[in-house]
Amino acid sequence: MSLKSRAVGWLALSCIAAIVVLNGNPQFTNASQPARGIGSPVIALEVARNVDEVDDVLGEAPSPDREAMRIKQYIDFFFIASYSGLYIALAWMLRTRLAAFAMICGLAAAVFDVIENFAILRLLKVPLAYTTQAMVDAIRYPSLAKWALAFAASALFGASFWRRQRSSLRTIAAFNFAAAAIGLYGIFDNAALLWAGIPLFAGLVTMVAVFWRFR
């Protein structure tokens, strides 16, 4: 139990570190103004519906915002590795069917995340005049699949934690449930996806606090 819980703690900390770095420099310029009230340029590009929404985020190629987005995609590969490891460690620790199914959903989300990242990296090199709807859809559809699977994983892991009947684990479960509820709503109202990150981040912090207690 000690080894498993410490693995969860370290991987949760790794996810937190990746999120902090992703939200750090380089920052987007004031020219990046995502459409539809989406507060994050990264999320806005992931769910862009057309070339105009890509223009709102990135501008014409080349641009400082395209370079910032490129760097953040490379950082995101580290985040993908971190949360994939966390899903595996959680399933290993919890050892329930729900947790195993959650891990499968989470790892499938990671696959779509990788597909999305490569699609974004390809698009960043292309001037707006040559950016097609197919290129936009190659980002949007894997992104929506990623978000749906990731929040399904959050809900399923939350259910596994809730069954443990410990207050600290039920706190993690509550954050997971909140993230899943907001995030799944965000599939339809994409502006909500950013807000789902708040309980998700809080759940990671709680995991670190709880699972580092085991020695």
Image (tube, rainbow, N blue to C red):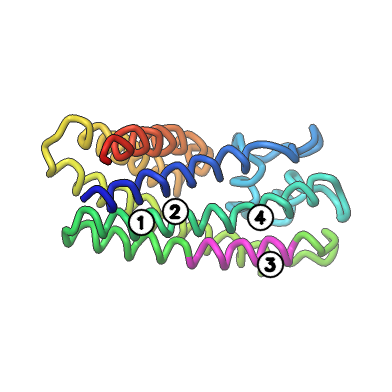
Tell me which label, 3 or 4, sits earlier in the chain: 4
Q: Which residue is mark 3?
A: 135
Q: Which residues are magenta?
A: 111-123
Disc 1 to disc 2, C-alpha distance: 6 Å
Q: In the visual, does 170 lie left or right of 21?
A: left
Point out which mark residue 83 bears: 2
Query: Which of 108/142 is in front?
Result: 108
User: Which residue is drawn at the image coordinates 17% and 41% (left, top)?
Assistant: 162
| Contact between labelled residues 1 and 4, with CB atoms less than 8 Å apart | no
Q: Which residue is mark 1?
A: 87
Disc 2 to disc 4, C-alpha distance: 15 Å
- Relative vertical location of residue 34 with respect to residue 48 in this rendering, above or below: above
Query: Disc 1 marks which amino acid?
Result: Tyr
Point out which mark residue 73 bears: 4
User: Which residue is drawn at the image coordinates 81% and 63% (left, top)?
Assistant: 125
| Contact between labelled residues 2 and 1, with CB atoms less than 8 Å apart | yes
The percent coordinates of residue 114 (x first, y second) are 56, 65
Residue 176 appears in the rendering: yes
Disc 3 to disc 1, C-alpha distance: 30 Å
Q: Is residue 120 magenta?
A: yes
